[in-house]
Amino acid sequence: MFHDLGEVLLLLARTFRALPHTVRQRRKVLEQLFEIGNASLLMACILSLFIGGVLALQTGPVMAERGLQSFIGQIVGLSMCRELAPVMMAVLIAGRIGSAMAAEIGSMRVYQEIDALRTMNINPVHYLVLPRVVAISIALPLLVVFSILVGWAGGALVAVTNYQIGISFHGYVKSLGNGIDVLDVVNGLLKSFGFAVTIGLVACHQGLSTVGGPRGIGRSVTKAVVNSIVMILLLDYVFTRLLMHLD
């Protein structure tokens, strides 16, 4: 794990140095963006709708018993912005996109396509890693925005239709507006950007490190997903502490 972390940090440095080449790779970046959106958007919306609904369903009746149902919008809003949307979307992307990246690059590694790129004087970091990291760094924050909005809608649907909560749609929206600040959304977007870079780098590193034929590809995919999720949770704590101090 710690060896992989060191390798990922080295890949981060190499990718950062390659950023000026992004314009040359814009077509591959757009292709990756389309693939990420096509594979994840519908699932992200469904997941977020149920997360927002379950959050309102779990907290709403308890708060209503204490006469605090007017705060349900704030709870759903803050939870989606600061924590649930960034983390859940990152885990979703790690499972669907990170695994695909690791498998694709791992296959190229096993079948010596990466060696062929080097023979043609094409830098694998520029050609393979950079477009994927840039694309996922754009796509994940956008997915988080969708997730936040759909999660709010899911919370509203449950809060308004559940007789145990007893809040109107207007009251829910008013509570949401009173409790949410622009900084709360920025908080979630900053987290999601950090998660995205981590997922992209971990997946690409595992793909580039693949050895052992088809079985090695399977191991790389598993390590990419597991390591990404572990890093997401660790970074979530670090980002939360830092952003709390900044607030």
Image (tube, rainbow, N blue to C red):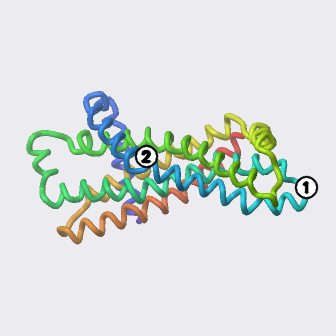
Residue 215 is situated, as x and y percent measured from the top left of the image, at 23, 71
Q: Residues within 10 Å of mark 1 (few under 14, many from 20)?
A: few
- Residue annotated with mark 1: 67
Residue 161 is situated, as x and y percent measured from the top left of the image, at 74, 54
Instruction: Quarter of the image for the N terminus: give it.
Output: bottom left
**Residue shown at the point (35%, 67%) measured from the top left:** 222
The first of marks 2 and 1 along the sequence is 1
- Residue annotated with mark 2: 197
For the residue marked with disc 2, what is the amino acid?
Answer: Val
**Residue shown at the point (29%, 39%) measured from the top left:** 31
Q: Nearer the viewer, residue 66 or 206?
A: 66
Of circles 2 and 1, the one toward us is: 1
Secondary structure beneath disc 2? helix
Q: Is 90 on the left or on the right of 127, as rendered?
A: right
Q: Is 128 on the left or on the right of 144, as rendered?
A: left
**Up-down relation of residue 92 to residue 191 (above or below):** below
**Residue shown at the point (65%, 44%) measured from the top left:** 243
Task: Give residue 104's mark.
Answer: none
**Residue shown at the point (72%, 56%) measured from the top left:** 56
Secondary structure beneath disc 1? loop
Quarter occupied by residue 184: top right
Residue 16 is situated, as x and y percent measured from the top left of the image, at 37, 38
Answer whether labels 2 and 1 touch (C-beta < 8 Å): no
Quarter occupied by residue 126: top left
For the residue marked with disc 1, what is the amino acid?
Answer: Gly
